[in-house]
Amino acid sequence: MNKRWIGGLQKVLWIGEKDARIYFFKGPNLTFGLFLPLVLYWAFALDREMELAMIIPGLVAIAIFFGAGAIQAVSLPLERRTGTLHTMLATPVTPLMIVLGKALAGVVFGLALAIVYMAVVLLFLPLQPNLILFSVATLFSSFCFSCFGLCLAAPFRDVPQAMPPATVVRIIMVFLSGAFAPLGTASALWQTIALISPLTYAVDALRQATNGPADAQRFMIDLGVQLLYGVIFLGIATWLLQRENG
């Protein structure tokens, strides 16, 4: 039993390493992950009067949101089209291993983007984030959004099919999350809708970790909701791959 688990873990790590090397850690992807949140902020929220200490966690959350999951809309359909996915499914690799490996690559990339963002921010702004809470919030967010990206990409067989709907869904979620403005200033309906979005909980967790003091109960709820969403997204993506292999 132990050998089976170890063998399965090795396959997950191999798939994650392969995806990180081939798809994620490329110059254009790093640039995309780092600068897209800034572009969105400059385009839609620059004229709002908000302290940078409130904006930075939202930018980090959006960087993780797009960085950890957006490349999945390229890697999964591309591997379907080229036959790589079918080749893996024909080997002693289960759909769950494939999904976990691809999710792992997204998690690592999301963590890397968050670290770069905060390192730059701390050089220029007098912020004193709780680094432990920030690391935990970043880890949970990266897991959730990487699984979300897989869930969005799993139904499609080609990149042009997968990218437009995934991008539209993400943009809508950005405006529902309170990343650029506190949700307390929004209408009751808007706040209710925002509770559906996992990005809302990522933004809140990162704001607590960055600005403090953190509310332990609220912080744990933020992490718990993201974990639950991540598991659900992971399950849906695995089920879709199993259907293809069935």
Image (tube, grey):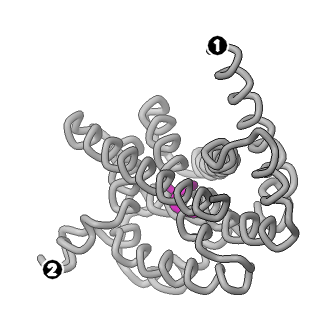
Evaluate whether residue 120 shows in this view. Answer: no
Identify the mark at residue 131; answer none if there is no mark.
none
Task: Pick whichever, 10 or 133, lies toward us.
Answer: 10
The reply, left or right, for residue 89 in relation to residue 47 is right
Q: Which mark is residue 189?
A: 2
Q: Tell me: residue 147, above or below residue 158.
A: above
Q: Does 148 appear in magenta?
A: yes
In the image, taking residue 43 as reference, residue 228 lies left or right, namely left
Helix, strand or loop at disc 2? helix
Q: Position of residue 179 (x, y in %)?
A: 40, 67
Work out whether mark 2 precedes mark 1 in sequence or the reverse, and give the earlier one. Answer: 1
- Expressed as whole percent of the image width and height from the top left, the position of residue 150 reads 59, 61
Q: Residue pushed farthest top?
A: 2
Marks 2 and 1 close (CB-CB < 8 Å): no
Tell me what residue is drawn at x 76 percent, y 64 percent: 75
Left/right placement of residue 91 relative to residue 98 reads right
What residue is at 40 percent from the left and 62 percent from the top? 199
The answer to which image quadrant residue 93 occupies is top right
Q: Position of residue 12 (x, y in %)?
A: 71, 37
Residue 240 location in percent, x, y? 56, 63
Q: Residues within 10 Å of mark 2 (few under 14, many from 20)?
A: few
SS at badge 1:
helix
The crowding category of the residue bearing disc 1, from other C-alpha atoms within 10 Å (few below 14, some 14 to 19, many at least 20), is few
Q: Dividing the picture into quarters, in which one does residue 40 lie?
A: bottom right
Q: Residue at x 47, y 52 (%)?
A: 235
The disc placed on residue 2 is 1
Please provide the residue range marked out in magenta.
145-149
